[in-house]
Amino acid sequence: MPCSLPEFSVPLITIFFLVFGASNVSNAIVPTSSTFKYVNEDYRPLLTYLFPFQLCFYNTTPNAFTLALRMGSPRSESIMRWVWEANRGRPVRENATLTFGSDGNLVLADADGTVAWQNGHCQQGRVLVGQTLRSNGPKKLVSRMSIADGFEGPYSFVMEQRFLKKYYKTKNSASPFLYHRSDEFGNGQGSLANLIFYCKPGTEQAYTYKLGFTSDMKGSTSSGTYIFSRPKYNSTYSLLRVESDGNLTIYTFNENTTFKLFDGDDHESRCNLPKKSGSLGICDDNQCVACPKPKGLTGWSQSCAPPALSPCKSAANVGYYKVVGVEHFTSKYTEGDGPMKLNDCRVKCSNDCGCLGFFYREESSKCLLVPELGPWLRAQSIVILKGLELSNSDGMFGRYYINEGETGELSVEYFADYRALPIFLLPFQLCFYNTTPNAFTLGLRMGSRRSESLMRWVWDANRGRPVRENATLTFGSNGNLVLADADGTVAWQTGTANKGVVGLNIQQNGNLVLYEKKGKFIWQSFDHPTDTLLVGQTLRSNGPNKLVSRTSIADGSEGPYSFVMEQRFLKMYYKTKNSPLPLLYYRSYEFGNGQGSLANLKFYCSPETEQAYAYELGFTFDMKGSTSSGTYILSRPKYNSTHSMLRVEPDGKLKIYTFNENVEWGTWENTFKLFDGDDYESLCNLPRKCGSLGICEDNQCVACPKPKGLMGWSKSCAPPVLSPCKGGGDNVGYYKVVGVEHFTNGYTEGDGPMKLNDCRVKCSNDCGCLGFFYKEESSKCLLVPELGTLVKVTNLAHVAYIKMPK
């Protein structure tokens, strides 16, 4: 396909012709040139560049080079990305040459003189800002085959009629599979003429930037924008790329990823990716959970594959096995043919040598034949005001608020109903809220009425002691703030009666304070953290030293997970009813160089440089018994992140959420995840990632260990039900699971060394022991009161024994 140079805000032609001299070059022969000739030797950035772009030779396999344009900065330690390739799928060898001739032709020739590429021929898998897809020109992007193989891959992003579509091409079908389709452009009229990948400020103040497409139509007066992402900084240097796994991703130079179409959260489920589960698998909640076999569901692994079929000659030599409650990854966009009877659908597939199976919807009798299985989707039906300060001078002593009346209409966390109180300072406000009927919590929320984004709860007063309708909040003349239930029972109070309190307000950092006449705080919410820290809030060795999660989204009482400042470490624990001691599932690196213990840990945010291009989010710390102090950086957002909150989630994760009051859309961003499955901790280290039992590999639950072997994982996977424990091992047995570790094994190996049988006896005599983990090479024995997530490892000498009744 002919390829014109893209229309960039910084013309790419400047990059190509910046230092080129003249030489005599024909279209097919590359003669020796002394005026311009780049020879492919050593690591190969060429002298053709304009920051942040540079032309290079690169290779991913030995002696197979591509001429490409990279984007990035040598000043930074961040990755540089390839944004354009010349000789895609036609690699050259060592000593290949790039020559710019006097006839204006740019030619890449292999070492033997064979022309591998010349300007006028290209095929791309990405676009830069300012680049255009056109109905009469290049209208699609095609992925790489893999990270190592730059040939055209199976995935494409196509501008087609009035839609943007994602296709997957398979050798078993003449037509590619549609696995994503955008909203319709043009109000049902005309077709897309041009799509320009654009970036521009969202407001005059440029607090946020829009990244997406501008469009115009043929046969319609419609035009407009299609927004993918709204980064909080200048995002002109962005590229949109079809990845080798079929995802569609925007990368912005200044940050790693600003948009993923298949993100498993705000946009499309990862289960809609054609090869999410390899050649076969059942996908649920963005993870591969089972391998469908003729005898039932087994644990999923990358070896899961359809049955090998005999050479196709007739329908007589094939049969079928049934899997209930699944859809094909294309089912969102096609139901198939019909209506027709089930047997007719079966016959149709049997007579089609390219058909590997069929999907049948009993309610509509629709029949979908598929030449590629891929992932099956389980249970998939188919995603500045000034605050009011209460003080004695305002005559506010004795003021009380009754929990009654209409509830608010704004979107808040936990699907809660709420009643806002007139105690606020943007973006914070005190409210009554409830997640279950007639059970209210006095809480502090953070967010903005101007935005349509979610408001988050950052502090609870009466945690675990909810009040009912007509409860009252009273600021007494004695300086005490009291929450009482409708019958007068005190549910919570500040305990500040007769201590000189003259007023109450919310500070700019979200700290609710009661103060005396000189401004000294007599009581503050920052001294009583629940599951959240706000910027400026401190954990102390002689005060509150931990955060404790909610029990669930609906239940705000103390849950099983905690984040604790302990000695010289930050730790995360999981509390189980089967053990008096919580289980350690995360520990930070050691503070203080092995001396002293942590005294204070303050959650902080500050600009990284004077220009404030990035902000540091993390902890400042100081020690007792050591002169050590410093910072512990968790995240580096590219905008002012003062309104951030660090929270222990009900599922045991540790996250930072950042609120940007300067934007009206997408005001919240998740700026840090401890258990992200990528840069930090694996999701498999979460105690309940796989519920009460499951094997976890590559951040997903892949199997349910049963006495008869590994089965497909689902949320119903559970340990065997044991008979009442009477002591001794007479009424219990064990089944063995090879190549797994407990989620606590990263921080404890257990007792020993001891023999395997001694470990077994020890667990059998312990009524709280649900199983044990044994490392054969060290003879270490770990008894566990909770099974939860079993982490798949390559070492087959690491074995689990799960207790079961005899």
Image (spheres, grey):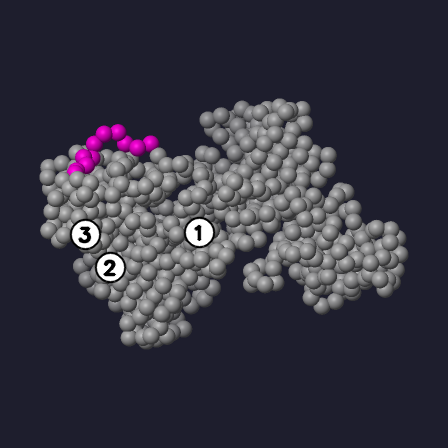
Cα gap from disc 1 to disc 3, whole angstroms: 33 Å
**Residue at 45%, 39% in the rendered image:** 665
Label 1 or label 2, whichever lies nearer to me, is 1
Can residue 88 be seen by looking at this rendering?
no
Q: Nearer the viewer, residue 683 or 343?
A: 683
Tag 1–tag 2 contact (CB < 8 Å): no
Q: Residue at x 58, y 25 (%)?
A: 187
Q: Position of residue 662 (x, y in %)?
A: 44, 43
* Residue 672 seen by the camera: yes
* Along the line of sight, the residue nearer the viewer: 661 or 792: 661
Position of 34 with respect to 606 (left or right) is right
Of the residues shown, which amino acid type is indicated by label 2? Answer: Pro
- Specify the segment rendered in magenta: 399-409
Q: How crowded is mark 1: few (under 14 residues within 10 Å), some or many (20 or more)?
A: many
The total number of labels drawn is: 3
Give the mark, 3 or 2, whose residue is nearer the N terminus: 3
Rendered location of residue 704, percent (x, y): 39, 52
Residue highlighted by disc 3: 517
Which quarter of the image is occupied by the N terminus?
Answer: top right
Residue at horizontal 44%, vertical 39%?
Answer: 664
Q: Position of residue 412 (x, y in %)?
A: 34, 39
Is 321 one of the magenta-colored residues? no
Label 3 Cα crowd, 10 Å radius (few <14 / some 14-19 / many 20+): few
Q: Residue 640 carries which label?
A: 1
Given this view, does label 3 or label 2 mark the residue nearer the observer?
3
Residue at image position (20%, 35%) is 403
Q: In the rendered structure, which disc, 1 or 2, sits on the residue that comes first in sequence?
A: 2
Under circle 1, the secondary element is loop
Write down the residue under mark 2: 544
CA distance for labels 3 and 2: 26 Å
